[in-house]
Every structure is written in structure tokens, then in C-alpha cells.
Image (cartoon, rainbow, N blue to C red):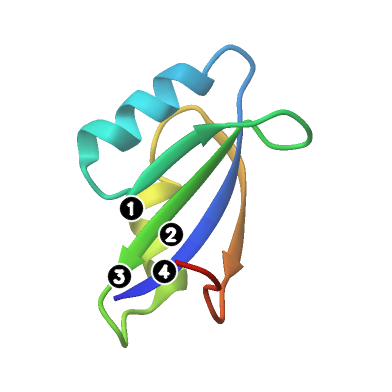
Amino acid sequence: MTPFFVQIKCKLGKSYEVANKLAEAEIASEIYSTAGDFDLLVKFYVEPGTDIGHFVNEKVQVIPGIQDTRTLITFKAFGA
């Protein structure tokens, strides 16, 4: 599986709704609330060869209450 992260900026007052919708969709591995420029940090896994851009566009950005996203592609996990 290929991991990647998406930082999500929500419309005002919508971060809990967005987090719940992501959880209900069962597409995210982990969902964290964060402080700073973005409201949520979400970890996803997709099958190798999956177009991550299409995945984010078709599965994540369509959730009501999302204002902006930033996708982070990872290379190697260190540690246990």
C-alpha cells in the first residue's frame, strides 16, 4: 500500500463535520485535528499505481465543508 497525507482547511465551524464524514466514508487510515494553517491532517493508503491526484479530487475534495487541501507524498518511513 502507498501512504500519503492530506492537510485539510475547513470552512469555519465545519472541521468536526468534515472529520466525521471522512471517518464515515472509511477511506482514511488516521484523522487528526491540528492547529495552524490547516484544521485536519489525514493519512490515507492506496493501492500501488493508484492516481493520488484523482483519489484526492474524487474522494476527499468532494466532502462538504472542505475549503482547501494540501497533499503530502511520503518516501520512506523510519523506525518501528
Contact, mark 2 vs mark 4 (Cβ under 8 Å): no
Using the rendered view, name the quadrant where residue 64 is placed.
top left
Residue type for callout 2: Val
x and y percentages locating residue 38 in the rendered image:
69, 37
- How far apart marks 2 and 1 lie (CA) works out to 5 Å
Q: Which of the labelled discs sits on residue 59, or is there none?
A: 1
Report the side of 55 relative to 7 (left or right).
Answer: left
Residue type for callout 4: Pro
| Residue, disc 4 | 3
Contact, mark 1 vs mark 4 (Cβ under 8 Å): no
- How far apart marks 2 and 4 lie (CA) works out to 13 Å
- How far apart marks 1 and 4 lie (CA) works out to 15 Å
Q: Earlier in the sequence, mark 2 or mark 3?
A: 3
Q: Residue at x 43, y 27 (%)?
A: 18
- How far apart marks 3 and 1 lie (CA) works out to 12 Å
Q: Earlier in the sequence, mark 1 or mark 4?
A: 4
| Residue, disc 2 | 56
Instruction: Tell me the quadrant of the picture where the C terminus can be found.
Output: bottom left
Q: Residue at x 47, y 46 (%)?
A: 42
Instruction: Tell me the quadrant of the picture where the N terminus can be found.
Output: bottom left
Residue type for callout 1: Lys
Mark closer to the observer (3, 4): 4
Residue type for callout 3: Val
Contact, mark 3 vs mark 1 (Cβ under 8 Å): no
